[in-house]
Image (spheres, rainbow, N blue to C red):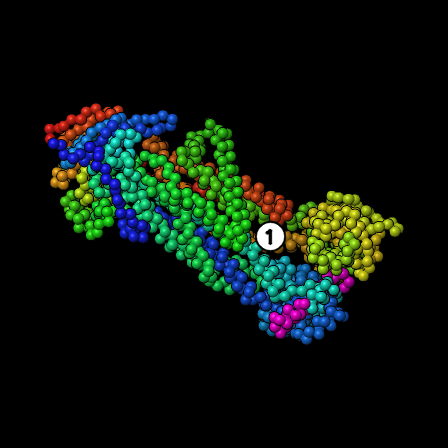
Amino acid sequence: MTSKPVLEAESLTKTYRSADRSLTVLDSVSFRVEQGNSLAIIGPSGSGKTTLLGLCAGLDVPTSGTLSLMGFKLNNMSEDDRAYVRNQYVGFVFQNFQLLPTLTALENVMVPLELRGEKNVAPKAKELLERVGLKERMQHFPTQLSGGEQQRVAMARAFITAPKILFADEPTGNLDDENASHITDLLFGMNREEQTTLVLVTHNLELAQKTQRILRMKGGKLMEDSNTSI
Amino acid sequence: MLEYIIKIKRNTTNIFTDAFAWRMAWRDARHNFSRLFLFIASLITGIAAVVSLDSLNNSLQQDIERNAKELLGADLVLNSNKKFEGEALQVIDSTRYTLAGEAELSSMVLFKNSGQTRLIRLVALQGDFPFYGELKTLPTTAYAQMKSGAYAIMDEALASQYEVSSGDSIKIGNSTFPVAGIVTQIPGGGGLAATFAPSVYIALNQLDSTGLVQFGSRITYSVYVKTKDDAATEALVKEVETLSKKFGYSYETVQRRKEGLGEGFQSVYRFFSLLAFVALILGCIGVASSVHIYAREKRDEVAVLRCIGSSGWQAFNIYFIQIFILGLIGSAVGSFAGLGIQQLIPVLFSDYLPMEVSFTISWSSLLLGFVLGALVSVLFSILPLVSIRFVPPLTVLRADFQATKVWSKTRLAAIVLIILFPISFAAFQTKSLLTGALFFAGLAVALGALAGVAWLLLKAVRTFFPAGAPFVWRHALANLFRPNNQTQMLMVSIGLGAFIISTLNIVEESMLSQVEFAGNENQSNTIMFDIQPPQKEGVLNLMRDNALPIHQVVPIVTCRLSEVKGKSTDFLQSDTTDSISDWALAREYRITYRDSLTKAEELIKGELHKKVSGKDSVWVTISEGMHENLKVDVGDSLVFDIQGVPLKVRIAGIRKVEWQNDPPNFIFVFPTNVLENAPQIFVTTTRITDQSLANKFQQELVTLFPNVSLIDLRLILSTVQELFDKLGLVVRFLALFSIITGLVVLAGAIMNSKFVRIKENVLLRTVGARTRQIVQITLIEYAYLGFFSALTGVLLSLGGGWLLTTFFFEISFSFSGLELFIISLGVVSLTMLLGWFNLRGIVNTPPLQILRKET
């Protein structure tokens, strides 16, 4: 018996119009991800992997095909409804961290819960920051933190809502080896502890091999869907 | 497995209850206030302009109301160019009210201390004038001393100019008067009139001793009346109206003076309103522009917020709260700054006001500024802020992702309100919807014309720019045409500032050129008038003795109209259906006779009758313009009352007269052989180029012919010049509002393009451009921008200036190429300075540092 899919894509196609011609960047991609699984999307530049991630996370809508996230059919939703779904069920980690520069590390971590209207969220945010090793840096602004530290704040922010699914776009792409290794450990460690589903886009085969499953993209098409030894 | 679709029920909160939005607004703003500097600067400048000018107007209106009686010095003033005698005097005396008398005429004065002479306004006073207000002198006893005998007091400016002090003597006509003191304040006096004709005051009973009251002398007699109350004044006015019609008197009441002054200030206020309107609109553009920059800077942060679950409205609310609160702060600061600036205005205006103005704080202006500021900050920030609602969250993954433009209801409503706002504001300011709409239309036409000229210029430059020009010049020019460039918008905003300044300069130049004829070769610059027939040869001989050319000797006969086209002037004045102006019917005309046209005249209709033979009808010519006022044409009849003798004439022709060219010029010119025996006086003109000769001649003239007055046109020229210098200062001070706001808009627009420039410069440096080359490219680009903007403004100001001088001021159009060049140079330098100031950090930063920041 298969468990409930957290994410289910069926014939996803994305076409952009550029001048007087259309460009298909994603061509009829179908797959599904079950709760607690980890998945890596790999492929060369321009293969459509970031577009696929954006669609899966509800950041954009497909030109055709259907997409369901946590049972919500994203195609038919307004942008604000999709934002609500993201806030309730999704976490993000980006290559360039995407912290709000005007907020401190602590405030950055608190934002997703505050958006839900929750009160007294600081203790939980502090706890997460301690967990990622930033107890002493909570009141620092992003510009006062190193790249590795910023990514750890981003991870704390991603996990504070206890997301059902975490999307990570090249999470170690902007980090040196030592920091990359630290972030990788944290990402997979927290993923296991929180039983979060992980979808990650990477060029890094070594990182991809740490997931249970790899989708290989090329020219906008899904070329291979294989399980790893994990 | 897509069957379990759930309908989402989100908890939506409004801006007032959304604690997250308020918390985020504060967190985000605490380190961001400097980024909103442009926004707040635009708002403060615009609001300060409106408040200071509105408050000034309120102060003036209040002071006119409060000091109305002091402006006139009495309840009623009756004026005539004849002495009050006979029946009229009886009627006035019978009122038993307190009376004071005055006679006023132009005369030459000889300052004994220096031997210099000058044409002045001689005021001979009798009785206890003023009844309201105070005639203040230095020393304080001077006025009493003047009334006690043969003493004179004079305007402060005149005494200061000719270095006259108490105890010195002046000669007026045949009499010498010791100077008792100076007049520092007089009801109804001072102001602009005193700049042109400074006054000397003597007692009325001393006037005859001067010998100035002769046939043909232009003297205005006034009787000041103090009644017991307003009702008594009203009753008296009814009696005076009858006298006025019967004897051709004019009268003025406190109410009339107040209305006249109010109307005068209303015109000034309309001009101020226009400046405030322009400053406010520029402020609005500044607000919109700075919020647009701000919203663009916040795009990435909004994308992150959207990504982690913020709704579009929540994100909008965060930044709207910031803008609104800062808008309130800016409105308050702008309003108080406006009141502060208003305190400076009296310093600039004091010379032109006929009273002391108190300039009290106007709470209504303060409230207006506050409300207006809040309104502007909301209205003009909504449009750029609405874009925040539609920032696609996908931007976090693809920074260059562009969302399709969404036409929301909010956006449409904002556009409609933005169009309605300037019309409503202008209508509110001018208290007329039509004027408001005209203001708006005027601004729209001006901005449209500026945009059109800017577009044409850019097109021409792109088409004709030499391809072989050096790299930095070509590259700097190409920068103006970069994608998403704001060149045309910048040219319009900077061009508007240049347009205002240049138009002002052109109007000033045109007005000055009207009086500069005195400087032309062969033109008369000295006019002598009030020459009695027995004095004519003596005056001409004196001119010959001093080797002065005699340009004209013109006879002048004074008369009034008694009939126009067969109807008596009395009848026409009482007939409410005819449209002939009463002043044209009742005024005294000074006419001449000759058999030819002067070089200032051109016959545009009819013919010229040179001489009357035997019992021919008398055919006269009339000046263009006056024939419209009197509603007469060629062939129509008129009857003149010439010193009691009626003379019927017909209009033979209409002359176009260049009034400023070789004066004196006349409304009516009779043929010869008609008026030669009528009582007359003469005017003669000459040209004196040497100042010492002018002084010597004037002294001799005043000594030998004390009643003859002399106008030195060079003195008038320098007075007009001085007046313009002062008025120009006031207008420039007020135009400064528009310019400062324009500069804020410019700074905003430059900052707007900053990010594009960073990338361009980094790219150039990466491929090997040296700092010097980047600096050159930057400066040349701004020089182009400043130059094209100045050219746009100046070109348009030539058109605007021509329209203003031709149709509004009705004077010849004239401009100084050099001064317009200097204005353009100023605009170019300012633009370059601002551009450089904005970019200096970027140019000096290593490319890697910027590249890192960009990733």
One can see residue B581 in this view:
yes
Whether residue B28 appears in this view of the structure is: no
Please give the range of residues in magenta: B214-238
Residue B14 horizontal side relative to residue B464, left or right: left
**In the picture, residue B196 is in which quadrant?**
bottom right
Identify the image quadrant of residue A205: top left
- The residue at the far right in this view is B614
- B361 displayed left or right of B93: left
| The C terminus of chain B - image quarter | top left
Mark 1 belongs to chain: B
**Where is B307 relative to B526, above or below?**
above
Q: Is residue B99 left or right of residue B642?
A: left
- Crowding at mark 1 (Cα within 10 Å: few <14, some 14-19, many 20+): some
B828 magenta-colored: no
- What's the amino acid at mark 1? Gln
Q: Which residue does the numbered mark 1 point to in the structure image?
A: B721
Q: Between B570 and B254, which is closer to the camera in this rendering?
A: B570
Q: Secondary structure at mark 1?
A: helix
Q: Where does residue B735 sit, x and y in percent of width and height?
A: 50, 50
Relative vertical location of residue B232 with respect to residue A40 in this rendering, above or below: below
Q: Quadrant of residue B841?
A: top left
Above or below for B404 versus B678:
above
Question: Residue at (27%, 34%) from the top-left corner?
Answer: A75
Q: Residue at x 52, y 58 (%)?
A: B57
Q: Please state the horizontal and vertical placement of residue B264, each as a whole percent of the image.
A: 59, 57
Vertical order, B696 against B395 (above or below): below
Which residue does the image show at 56% across and 63% down from the upper left?
A: B64
Q: Position of residue B324 (x, y in %)?
A: 36, 51
Closer-to-camera residue (A144/B425): B425
Q: Is residue B230 found inside the magenta-colored segment of the image?
A: yes
Residue located at (20% from left, 41% from top): A89
Count the labels in the image.
1
